Image (spheres, rainbow, N blue to C red):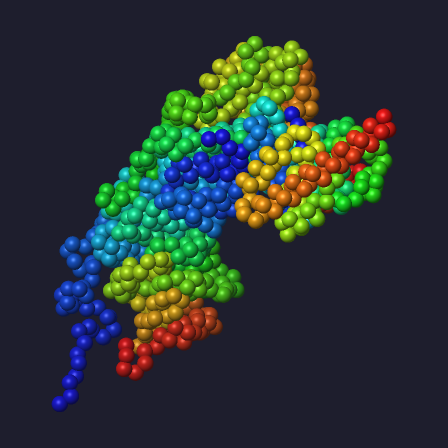
Amino acid sequence: MFQVRIHGRGGQGVVTAAEMLSVAAFDEGRHAQAFPSFGSERMGAPVVAFCRISDREIRLREPIMEPDAIIIQDPTLLHQVDVFAGLKQDGYILINTNKTFDQLGLGDMIRDWRQERLCTVPAMELALKHVGRPVPNVPLLGGFAAIAGVLKIESVIKAISERFAGKVAAGNIAAAKEAYAIVIAEMEAARRKENQHA
Amino acid sequence: MSFQPVKFYQTGTFTVGNRLLPPEERSVQASAKRYNSINSGHRACQGCGEALGARYAIDAAMEAADGQIIAANATGCLEVFSTPYPETSWQIPWIHSLFGNTAAVATGVAAALKVKGKRDVRVVAQGGDGGTTDIGFGCLSGMFERNDDVLYICYDNGGYMNTGVQRSSATPPAARTATTMAVGPEPGNVFGQGKFVPAIAMAHDIPYVATATVADLRDLEAKVSRAMEIRGARYIHILVPCPLGWGTASHDTIRMARLAKETGIFPVFEAEHGEIKSVLTIRRPLPVEEYLRPQKRYAHLFGKNPAVETIAHIQALADRNIRKYRLEARQGSH
Amino acid sequence: MLKQTEGSRAVAEAVALCRPEVICAYPISPQTHIVEALGEMVKDGSLAPCEFINVESEFAAMSVAIGASAAGARSYTATASQGLLYMAEAVYNASGLGLPIVMTVANRSIGAPINIWNDHSDALSQRDSGWLQLFAETNQEALDLHIQAFRLAEELSLPVMVCMDGFILTHAYERVDMPTQAQVDAYLPTYEPRQVLDPADPVSIGAMVGPEAFMEVRYLAHAKQLQALERIPAFAAEFRQIFGRDSGGLTHTYRTEDAETIIVAMGSVLGTIKDVVDEMREEGHRIGVLGITLFRPFPIARVREGLQGAKRVVVLEKSMAIGLGGILSTNVRMALSGLHMHGYTVIAGLGGRAITKKSLHGLFREAEQDALESVTFLDLDWNMVNKQLEREKAHRRSGPVAENLLRDVGVVAARNY
């Protein structure tokens, strides 16, 4: 079972992102369970949503406390909420930012982490560019398809076109594809770097 | 030589022999084929104004709807005296659910009829003043606001008579009830701000609102008939004296209702979409004392030291009704 | 058809397939998504003929359903928590009148303190209201139970409450198999009321009944629920024939063969419990699960049958009888009368407190050692509790309990960051 936790703020489509992840997994014939953190949060408040993906029926109903991957939709949360709580050793981290992990002040935390599992995507900029709205959730899903190898980008694109229609769907698909490409490139660069060190 | 028209009715009573009227103007109750929706043999008190009002109102609704009426009934005297097991007086389909939900139950019945395409079957909801102006008020307002196709009839006897004469929000100022006893420096019910639900109904801008009393049953029937011509939320508020709660003689029920109207204590009018369309005028307004004195619930106002100020206060309220609803007959009309 | 969707949406679609004729809606979390979806279907014409009524309170919602059902329409509403309590008088009335209304309860706690999260306090407060009560374990079961509920309600002329865990199920996206309209039509015949308001054949519904017949009317309500107990397995079997899966019924056992310890629970927590039981079974523990699908009428004989081989029974419930212990466990005890075994009540998950595998592992191991208190509060923060008890001992004006606890939690939380 692969477990994802998504952190963001009310209005950024955190819950939608988890739901779309589950739909993408379903489209691949897998079992998936997405659920929000069940708060009465208002716009702008920290929000968490979860997604489990498995090849078997998912019966577990506890919140995800030890995720395999964390998606951070809003980097301003990094020093407000313990977003990395319980993250498995060498788990995947995907942050919506145009800065590096060092610039975000996370250098110490990720020193011994496998570098290709640490990814950033300027998802807000991609959303503005392709969709015209500052909603980073969908581009990040494109990025997620690149990092963990859990889902194919095609499944994410299918989930997007099931959720949205017309221009919004097309824009989000373009943003997700670009995010996917960015993360693939980042990971390859990181692997090359690691190989050089090795 | 000038022509002098002579009216049929006798001055002061407003009664008129049905046989003198053309058939279409005759009272529903005058017909041998009247519906008897509430059959005789029920357990209401002698002189019950509510039983009288309900009989006329429901039969008039039946006449207007060609017998296709379903009634929802609030808990209260009308429900209790008409249906103690194993008897029921109701000759029409009738449901009693709770005290405070009658308007909503009627909404549900109307919705079912609509979805089943039974447009010819009409819905009447009915309750006393407690079930209407107090505990059922939320559901009533909701039904008005949605403009559900329901005629709601409130039989107002000014208190919770079924439970032993307690105060409701329709109990008039200074009246003695079991929870507003005639003791202390200000005996009887408080003056308060009043809660005249017909005016609140009008504020919902529903298509039809009317008041009536059991003193003028022909007027009551006419208002029910008019209401049945209209679709949407309609409200008729009928003053029904209660011999038990008011402390009046059983044979004085109609007289008391008439006095309520003739003093201006209870304005009788008709309104459509929030605007008053007609009033029953008063030819010579009577002093409120004539209405108050026969009622034991006001006995503390009279006696050795009459409560002159209180009576004057009630008179002022009646006078205000006369001004506000333009109840005084002008020259040349009645 | 398999689809990945939200629990609320799945239930709304299932309800729509049942062709409801009157739906009353009043918003309360976490039930709202269900009536929102149904409202949209009525407004866009895909669910027709149907009247969707936005009422002014839950009390009105149930009252409109009462009127509509009495006039012969298939009627549905949904609520939760305070909403269920606010409509309580009408809830009892609907069953007293024998009206086959179906209502979803998206289970949520009851305040004060106000809390929007899941437990079973709301539905269980209405356990003696005369309604049938079904509890769903998954969203698949939730949608299946709604289809069965209309059938049950109308055959028995009794209202049915389908309970599903608020947020945990209502807001969870997971796989469901949505039946076809033809399947539902084959299972659910047109509503033929036993009583109906009809000018052609006038009846009085809701007449006053005095001491001479009231006991008999009440007994008949009980007898009808006992009939339901006999007929529900047949309805579930028929459901299986048409829809090809097991859903509903009275109880479900899981790995109880040779089990020394059996855990009894209702609702979505059964999934987590089963995962724990699988892991413990692998380590050789003789442990199993009895899930209760039908809470009212309570399947006493079936529960007894399911538990009697065990050495101990742990009833894990998301509700409590304040001043006594458990509600579900008290009912289970009725089924175990005369059997000699250890019985434990565990109160868990109140107000949305997560029930984790880790806690359950610890709990079940303690139970196996018979080291549990007879009433245990799972994952209760004793520090918080004791601090408040001391505060109350020390000061007359100790202040609002909830505020004090929040302040204590706040201080602790602030230290972590």
Nearer-the-camera pick, C314 or C68: C68
Q: Residue B175 sits in which quadrant?
A: bottom left
Residue at point 39%, 69% (across, down)? B275
Q: Give the percent coordinates (x, y) of residue A189.
A: 78, 34
Q: Give the percent coordinates (x, y) of residue C369.
A: 68, 14
Above or below: residue C231 compared with residue C37: above
Q: Residue C102 sits in which quadrant?
A: top left
Residue at point 64%, 52% (across, down)? A132
Question: From the viewer's perspective, is A12 left or right of B33?
Answer: right
Question: From the viewer's perspective, is A95 left or right of C45?
Answer: right
**Residue reaching furthest to the bottom:** B1
Nearer-the-camera pick, B173 or B194: B194
Residue at point 40%, 67% (across, down)? B274
Question: From the viewer's perspective, is B294 left or right of C298?
Answer: left
Above or below: residue C68 compared with residue B131: above
Quadrant showing the C terminus of chain C: top right
